[in-house]
Amino acid sequence: MTAIRKVGVVGCGLMGSGIAQVAATAGFDTVVRDVSQPVLDRGRAGILKSLGRMVDKGTITSAARDASLARLRFVTELADLKDRDIIVEAVTEDLDLKNEIWRELDRTCPPGTLFASNTSSLTIGSMAETTRRADRFVGLHFFNPVPMMPLVEVVRTATTSAESFERAYAFARSLGKEPVAATDSPGFIVNLLLVPFLLDAARARERGTASTPDIDRAMQLGCGHPMGPLSLMDYIGLDTVVRIADIMVDAYGEDRYEAPALLRRMVDAGHHGRKTGKGFYDYSADPPKPVELVSR
Ligand code: CAA
């Protein structure tokens, strides 16, 4: 099994920057690519902030932070990823966009490069089939915030070779994560179960079952969740939740994956959660304040 030394990450949003951070901190030479310099700058600032928190808490030393940063490179060209041993793609949940990227990487990367998508709701097979390396294609699904959440779902398709799966599984372990094996069905394990729960929480809010903070507090204090479901949706991004729900309702045809009208109205109004400053809560206040719901 060829050792993985050089890591490439495509996409420097919340997930991509988190994956790049974790890879660099684990000692890998890491190159992260996004289309524009401002996106890369934002990603880099997020990594600096996260590493800074770890230094403040004493989880890592400032020398380890500096060494991690020295292992990270930010680029705008996909061609700069051509010498990587593994590519982890973490761009928007848009199959055409992902496949355009994969086709280009398939042309430029050597046969030994393992391809991994961080998709949370599309199938890995729908990407693998557009390349000439369906046997060297896996899913590596990380969770937000990537530096803090221990889980990685490692996904094999019908065509993934045993060696590729083992390489990916070992790679997840070498990042300090806990891998679980999942088969290639939309949502894998976590989102299959989490997404209906989040959508039900939005439906409860829409129906007026309780206030935003009371729904959140109920699940935190009654079930031991670290974050209430409405806060968690703000954290993931309401636009992302709706996109995942749409893909899952197409895949399974079940009402429980249908995003409620309230969520769609919030997304249409530009209330995407933390990243836009407003969702179920207003993040310009400290602590964040519940927001009056967007009406019809
Ligand atoms: N980088 C570094 N450190 C971080 C961090 C980051 N990005 N985020 C939080 N921390 C650290 C804090 O410094 C703090 O450290 P100490 O405990 O040493 O003080 C610790 O984590 C706790 O942070 P906070 O006090 O700010 O807040 P918290 O206790 O609520 O923890 C949390 C934050 C880890 C995010 C926690 O709330 C949590 O686990 N929430 C649930 C997250 C979750 O469910 N994620 C999955 C989302 S689904 C997904 O990602 C999949 C998908 O496809 C949609």
Image: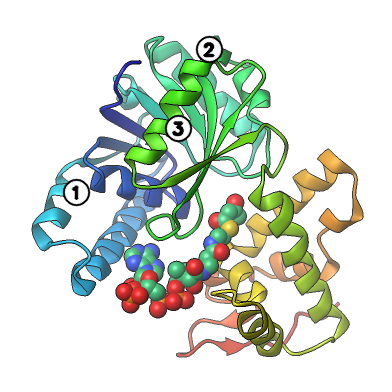
Q: Name which residue lies at 67% across and 83% down.
A: 222
Q: Name which residue lies at 45% across and 55% down.
A: 14
Q: Position of residue 90 (x, y in %)?
A: 49, 41
Sequence-earlier tag: 2 or 3: 2
Q: Position of residue 190 (x, y in %)?
A: 64, 51
Q: Position of residue 175 (x, y in %)?
A: 34, 43
Lateral position of residue 231 relative to residue 55, left or right? right
* Front label number (2 vs 3): 3
Looking at the rendering, the quadrant in which ligand 1 lies is bottom left
- The amino acid pointed to by label 3 is Tyr
* Front label number (1 vs 3): 3
- The amino acid pointed to by label 2 is Arg
Q: Which residue is mark 3?
A: 169
Graded by Cα atoms within 10 Å as few (under 14), some (14 to 19) or many (20 or more), the crowding at tag 3 reads: many
Sequence-earlier tag: 1 or 3: 1
The secondary structure type at the circle numbered 1 is helix
The secondary structure type at the circle numbered 2 is loop
Tell me the quadrant of the picture where the C terminus can be found: bottom right
Q: Which residue is mark 1?
A: 68
The secondary structure type at the circle numbered 3 is helix
- The amino acid pointed to by label 1 is Ser
Q: Which residue is mark 2?
A: 133
Graded by Cα atoms within 10 Å as few (under 14), some (14 to 19) or many (20 or more), the crowding at tag 2 reads: some
Tell me the quadrant of the picture where the N terminus can be found: top left
Q: Are marks 2 and 3 in contact (CB under 8 Å)?
A: no
Would the CB of label 2 be found within 8 Å of ligand 1?
no
Q: How is the image coloured?
A: rainbow
- Say which of 158 and 131 sits in front: 158
